[in-house]
């Protein structure tokens, strides 16, 4: 009996056409059902049908140690929710959400690092357990990359460790990246 292989390459023989019918992601040649693209072969023993489930490439799913950028969609006092826009420098349109818990950031005892709604933040993936993409400011270049004044939406400039609004003069705390750009 055929076992389920881990991953199969395009063209891999999956079964003879007498044994299994080819479903999604397969084609038939020389009396064999073969894989059409890279994926995981799934054998339905009842229906005698084999299909290929596509494998997403590793670079497109955030995994531990990856550097991501994202915009802050929800800012709570203890947590930021980021919509991930890039993974290791590559654009990601998949719309992953990452969570950045502020109370476990480095610099405990200091004021939690603050990002606000719409800020662009760079962070490091520290865990993907239970499907939750957990982020932290672990990399030396992690932090807020760009922001606008949270009061009036105007352009800001770096002012020491804070940002200052060019219009209303508001000074705000942010966990700024060394790469912060106004
Ligand atoms: Zn302002």
Image (cartoon, helix red, strand yellow):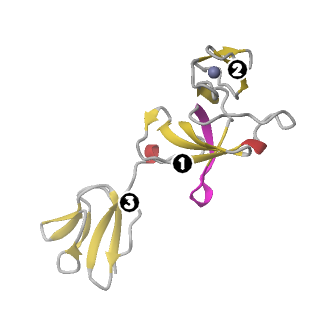
Q: CA distance from mark 1 to mark 3?
A: 27 Å
Residue where numbered disc 1 is placed: 97
- Of the two numbered discs 2 and 1 on the same chain, state the one appearing first in sequence: 1
Residue at 74%, 20% in the rendered image? 161
Q: From the top left corner, tell me how far across and down residue 74 is, in percent.
A: 60, 44
Where 37 sits versus 66, above or below?
Answer: below
Residue at 60%, 41% in the rendered image? 65
Image mark for residue 55: none
Residue 4 seen in the figure: yes
Which stretch did the figure color magenta? 120-133
Quadrant of the snapshot with the N terminus: bottom left
Residue where numbered disc 2 is placed: 170
Whether the residue under disc 2 has CB within 8 Å of ligand 1: yes
Foreground residue, 179 or 150? 150
Q: Quadrant of residue 73?
A: top right
Q: Is residue 116 magenta?
A: no
Check contact, mark 1 vs mark 3: CB within 8 A.
no
């Amino acid at each position: 009996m055929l076992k389920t292989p881990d991953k199969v390459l395009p063209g891999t023989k999956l079964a003879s056409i007498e044994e299994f019918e080819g479903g999604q992601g397969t084609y038939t040649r020389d009396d064999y059902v073969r894989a059409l693209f890279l994926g995981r072969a799934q054998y339905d023993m009842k229906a005698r049908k084999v299909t290929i489930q596509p494998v997403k490439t590793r670079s497109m799913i955030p995994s531990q140690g990856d550097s991501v950028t994202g915009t802050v969609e929800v800012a709570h006092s203890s947590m930021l929710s980021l919509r991930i826009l890039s993974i290791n420098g590559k654009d990601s349109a998949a719309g992953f959400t990452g969570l950045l818990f502020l109370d476990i950031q480095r610099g405990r005892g200091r004021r939690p690092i603050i990002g606000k709604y719409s800020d662009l933040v760079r962070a490091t993936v520290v865990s993907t357990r239970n499907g939750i993409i957990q982020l932290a400011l672990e990399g030396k270049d992690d932090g807020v990359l760009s922001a606008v004044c949270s009061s009036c939406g105007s352009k800001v400039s770096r002012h020491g460790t804070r940002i200052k609004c060019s219009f209303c003069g508001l000074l705000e705390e942010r966990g700024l990246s060394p790469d912060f750009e106004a």
